[in-house]
Structure formats: C-alpha cells, structure tokens
Image (spheres, coloured by chain):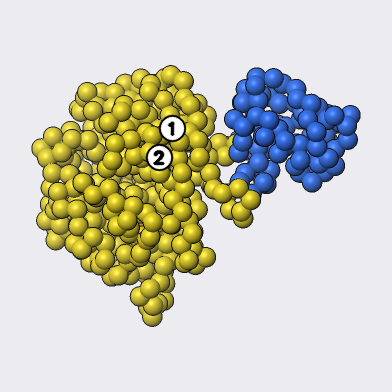
Amino acid sequence: MTELLVATKKGLFALQGDPGSPFEVTARAFAGEPVEYALRDQRSGRLIASVTSPFYGPKLWYADDPAGEWQQAEGVALPEGGDAALERIWVIVAGEEESVLYAGGDPGVLFESHDGGTTFELNRGLWEHPTRTQWQPGGGGLCLHSIATWPGEPQRLAAAISAAGVWLTDDGGETWRRGNQGLKARYLPEDTPDDEIALCVHRLHRAALRPERMFMQFHGGVYRSDDAGATWIDIAAGLPSDFGFPLVLDPADPDSAYVIPLTADMDRVTPDGRVRVYETRDAGASWAPRGEGLPPEHAYLTVLREAFDRTGEGPALELYFGATSGAVFGSGDAGASWFQVATHLPPVHAVTAGP
Amino acid sequence: MPLVRLRGPLKRLAGDRPEHAIEGATVAELLRALEREHPAAGGWILDERGVLRRHINVFVNGELVEQGTSVGSDDRVEILPAISGGR
C-alpha cells in the first residue's frame, strides 16, 4: 500500500492505494486552506505540513494522523523587528541525523528542527549571508525549494533558491558558498559575470548512491553536477523542451533522472497537449519519453516543482505527479506505464509518496 | 480599557475567549499586547515586522481603521479576516 500526501490550493489530501487503480482519499485536512507541502517523516511516522493562510500567514503544522489534531510548530518565523516577513514554506526534508528536519521557504530561508518538527530555528548562516541584498525573487517569490542532504554526512547540504542559485555548506550551515559554475541563464545578458547570483533553479536532487552527483531542472536547461555542485553541465539535449519544474531520481541508480518538460517559460503547459515524463538512465546522455497511460492529446497540464515524487527504488520504483488541473497520475513500474490516481482534486501544489 | 473582540481561530488561540480588555493607545499597541498575553496568537495578526497582515481588518466602533489609529478606553475593537483574502 502506498500513501500519497497531496498538498492543494484547498487543503491537504491523504490518499492510499496500490499502483494500477485510483487511490482512495482517506483524509482531508486544512479544508479551504492553501497547503504548500506535506511530508510524512518515515522515521517517526509524523506528518509535517506547510499551510499559508491568506489571513494569518505561513505556518508549519504536525500530526501523527492526517485526520487527527494538528499542532502548530514553533519558531517558523523571521527575526522580529526586521524589514522582512516569512511568506511561505515551500519544502520540508528529512535530515541525515535522527529527528532533524529542514524547511525551506520564502524569502530564501532555511529552518532546522532537531526535535522531529516540533520546533524550528532559522539558519543564520544563510539568513545573514553578505550577498543576500543581491538576491532576486523568481515568479514564485524568493523561494528556497530544494534541500539535498548528503547520505551519511549530516554537515553537508545543498540548497537551491529561485532565483538565487545553488548554495553549498560543509559545516552544517555555518557557512555557505555558491555552486553555480556552468549554469547559463537565457534571461540574462550573455556577458553576465560568472559570479552572477540571479540564477533561477527550479528543482535539485542528489543521487543517493553517488552523492557528489546532483541533477537540476533550471529555468531553461537541465543540468548535472559530478563534483558536489561546484560545476554543472547541460544535459537537456534530447528533451522536447528544457523548461520545466519537477525532477525525481531513482535512488538505486545514480545515472537516473525523470523530468516533466513544459513548453517554455512563456507557455507553462505540457508540450503539444501531450503529457509525458522523460527518463534518463545514462546520466542525461539520452532521454526517453514515458507516456503510456498518460493523456496523449488535448492535455495542457502544468506540473509545479514540488508536485512530483517517488517511493521505492529500482524495479519497484513508483512515481507520482499532480497537476494544477487537480489530476494525479502514478506509475508502479518506474515510469513504463501510468494510471490515474485521482481526477478531480483542487490544484495540486505538491505530492509526496511513501509506503 | 478598550475591548478587543475576536472570532474563529483567533478566539481559540486567545484562551477561547471572545472578548479581551487590553491596554493600548493605538491599534498596533493593542495587538502587540494581545500577542504578549496570548503567545499562541503570536504571528497570526501581526507579522515579524510588526505589520498588520494584509488580509486582516481591524474595526474600531464599527469603522475600518489602520494599525496606527488611536484607541480610547471605551472603544470596541474587532479583528476580522477580510473578504479580500478569500481565494
């Protein structure tokens, strides 16, 4: 049985089922509220959800049961009396150490929890970075949307911000350095200096079995790094478009990546009205479309950056993504074939999957 | 002392009481005092900058006001979600 947490514009939906048939909606929480992201921490079983009330502001909540009582996490705020306010928490990621969780948000901020999500603390190293005044928001705000831990080395993290590029730390977040060399932004002049920060990373993941390797969906470009984010090479050749948002890796295969291309930044829908996931198994040297069972025509979907996830690995890899149309699709065979998980949910912000 | 009236989640966060007599010369002072008295409501009305959240309306004696508005000891202050926040 697989559990999906589908964060939508109108609440959080928990779905359960087995690949091949529509899933059952087993719970809805935060009815009517925009839920940005939700994660079940597989170590503790606890659920953590990001909710941005248009009235009362962004909060993180936790519960053991999605249909149960949710508690507000403490510490999810910027320093009082400053000139900035927290806009939104975009992503929540389990850390390498027991009970450690990370939350990334707007304006380009990272929070850490050392008690499984009950309390959080702002990462000061990134918040007080001397280049922060140069950081520019992307269309979705100044969002820290990707946090890549390093298996077995809790001090090493990569974080990606739209549009402030990749940031790397080897000392648990005390100090941060840029990891942007090789990224080419078409929305900037050609003679932009190499140390430009205004780089619109859309999603970033690390290969579990080869942690120095990371894959990135960029704002025009799909990239791979084999040196822990120091340099990047474009691997988008063979895709119908190098624009898109979400990205998933198979943890059993460091040469694997899945993306869902959209037509272009000025037309953020699936190309030619056809929904297809693209898979590489050779680290981006080639890409193969995976569309069996997905809408083949007249389907102009938008899939947001956090709306694609996996559970399992290798031959048992399951993939799930949701669209702003409210449709959710899944694959129980690593993308070879697809089925409709749900049809009429509210616009999907994020999908996370687990056993 | 001005009387602050709360509804919905704000009422729940403030000890589940709908009315609170709170000292303050301005709306902002009242709201800060309310948050100090009921820390669970901290961040729900004012953001980290001390700015009234965009889709929260404050009325004094039925009139929509701003956070710098003066408040008298006999005034009735209502804090309500604005219809502009509905999506």
Left or right: where A272 falls relative to B24: left
Instruction: State the hue of chain B.
Output: blue
- CB atoms at circles 2 and 1 under 8 Å apart? yes
x and y percent of residue A157 in the render? 31, 53
Quadrant of image for the N terminus of chain A: top left
Pick the front one: A175 or A255 = A175
Chain of the residue under the numbered disc 2 shown in the image: A
Q: Amino acid at mark 1?
A: Thr
Q: Residues within 10 Å of mark 2 (few under 14, many from 20)?
A: many
Q: Amino acid at mark 2?
A: Ser
Of labels 2 and 1, earlier in sequence is 2
x and y percent of residue B35 in the render? 67, 34
Q: Quadrant of residue A8?
A: top left
SS at mark 1 in the image: loop
Question: Looking at the colours in the rendered structure, which chain would you say is drawn in yellow?
Answer: A
Residue marked by disc 2: A113
Q: Is residue A204 visible?
A: no
Q: Is residue A330 visible?
A: yes
Residue furthest out toward the bottom: A191
Residue marked by disc 1: A118
